[in-house]
Structure formats: C-alpha cells, structure tokens
Amino acid sequence: MRRIAGTASLLIFSVPLIDGSGGLVERHIVAVRIEPSPTRAVVEIVRVHAAGALAARARRLSIRLLRRLNDRILFEAQLASHAVQSLSMDEAQPGLFDQRELSAFEAARSEAQAIRQTLDNRRTDWERQSVISVGRPVLEVAFLADR
C-alpha cells in the first residue's frame, strides 16, 4: 500500500471472469476511488462493487458463448451421426463357423456407442464453459490518502 497526497484513496482490483469449469476467461482491472482511508469492511464493500461492475460483461459473454454453442453442438452431432452411419450394420447373420461378421458387427456397435458418449461428454464440457461468472476480485494496489 502506498500513500498519496489528497483526501481520496484509490483501490485497484483485478476481477476475473471465469467459466463454469473454473477456467479463467478474462481478467479486468477496476479502480475505485473512495474518500476516507478504507477499513477492512470498506474494502470488502468495494470488492463487491468491483465485481458488480463486470456483471453485465459476464452476462453478455455468456449469451454470446451460448449462441455459438448451439451451432457447435449441431455441427458435432451431424459429424457424429455421419460417423455412426458409416460404421453401422443393420444386422448380422454370421455363418455357423464364422464369427468374423459377428465380431465386426459388435465392434461397429461399440465404436458407435463410444462416438455418442464422446459427443455427450464434450457437450457437457462446452455447456459448462459457456456459463460465465464474475470471480472474487483481488485487491492488487491501494493508494491511501494522507490524512
């Protein structure tokens, strides 16, 4: 903390925007000027104010990511559908002593299920990453007024 001339103090916070999986999306600097030298309680109130300053940005970013998410999911679903169709066999009628056709059928079915499961897992991750919230602001620098 540093002392500056005058009656106002300046608190500088870094405010993270994080996605639903906890990943950092953006970090912003918010400066708040207050008249008296701050107490711990005042710093906590100002911290809430700094977070509120970025709430609208977090909402706009979430909306934008969710809109793009729908296109991404549609594309991936079509890709997965094509992959599953190219693997699938409608039915298998193995010969009496020939298990190759049955093995190929089972392998294709397992592969198709794995593709579907991968798409579901990725969709869940993408949805989580599309929800943006404001993290806890960190007080980086405080310029305190001389009294």
Image (tube, rainbow, N blue to C red):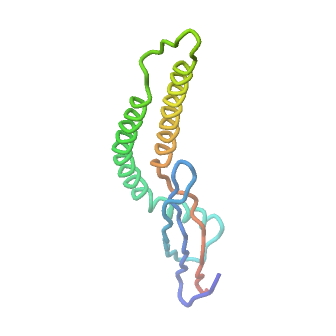
**Quadrant, the N terminus:** bottom right
Q: Residue furthest front?
A: 97
Closest to the observer, 51 or 80: 80
Rendered view: 113 above or below 49: above
Residue drawn at 44 percent across, 62 percent down: 53
Left/right placement of residue 87 relative to residue 64 reads: right
Q: Quadrant of residue 24?
A: bottom right
Residue 34 in the image, given as x and y percentages of width and height: 52, 74
**Quadrant, the C terminus:** bottom right
Residue 119 in the image, given as x and y percentages of width and height: 47, 37
Left/right placement of residue 64 relative to residue 15 reads: left
Closest to the observer, 76 or 105: 105
Closest to the observer, 92 or 34: 92
Left/right placement of residue 86 relative to residue 19 reads: left
Residue drawn at 36 percent across, 49 percent down: 63
Question: How many labels were placed on the picture?
Answer: 0
Q: Residue furthest top?
A: 96
Residue drawn at 45 percent across, 48 percent down: 130
Residue 74 in the image, given as x and y percentages of width and height: 35, 39
Rendered view: 140 above or below 76: below
Closest to the observer, 80 or 50: 80
Residue drawn at 51 percent across, 22 percent down: 105
